[in-house]
Amino acid sequence: MARLVEHDAHGPRKLTASDLDDEKGDIAICQCGLAESYPFCDGTHRETTDEDDDALYDYDVDDAQRRVVDRVVYADDE
């Protein structure tokens, strides 16, 4: 499975002690790219558990829809 993820940050985020979860005492970094609290995990990855290994997915966060796409075309592709 693959997922299209848009990023709008232009640099790293430095983690500090204030990033620790007071209840859990840990920091979970998002690896699916879908978390609203990105770069921190918020459990959104649970929506990806039924993804097919051979498919490419696009998640629309505005309407909470997942779509299978055939391919990705970039603006500079000819």
Image (cartoon, grey):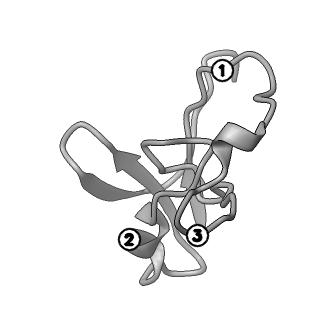
Q: Nearer the viewer, residue 56 or 7?
A: 7
The local secondary structure at tag 2 comes to helix
**Left of 71 or right of it: where is 14?**
right
Characterize the local packing of mark 1: few (<14), some (14-19) or many (20 or more) Cα atoms within 10 angstroms.
Answer: few
Q: Which residue is mark 3?
A: 24
Q: Identify the mark nearer the N-term, 1 or 3.
A: 1
Q: Identify the mark nearer the N-term, 3 or 2.
A: 3
**Left of 6 or right of it: where is 14?**
right
Q: Identify the mark nearer the N-term, 2 or 1.
A: 1
Name the spot of residue 71 as percent of width and height, x first: 55, 49
**Left of 9 or right of it: where is 44?**
left
Characterize the local packing of mark 3: few (<14), some (14-19) or many (20 or more) Cα atoms within 10 angstroms.
Answer: few
- Distance in Å between CA atoms under marks 1 and 3: 27 Å
Q: Which residue is mark 2?
A: 47
Q: Quadrant of residue 43?
A: bottom left
Q: Nearer the viewer, residue 50 or 17?
A: 17
Q: Which residue is mark 1?
A: 9
Given the image, on which type of amino acid does mark 3 rest?
Lys
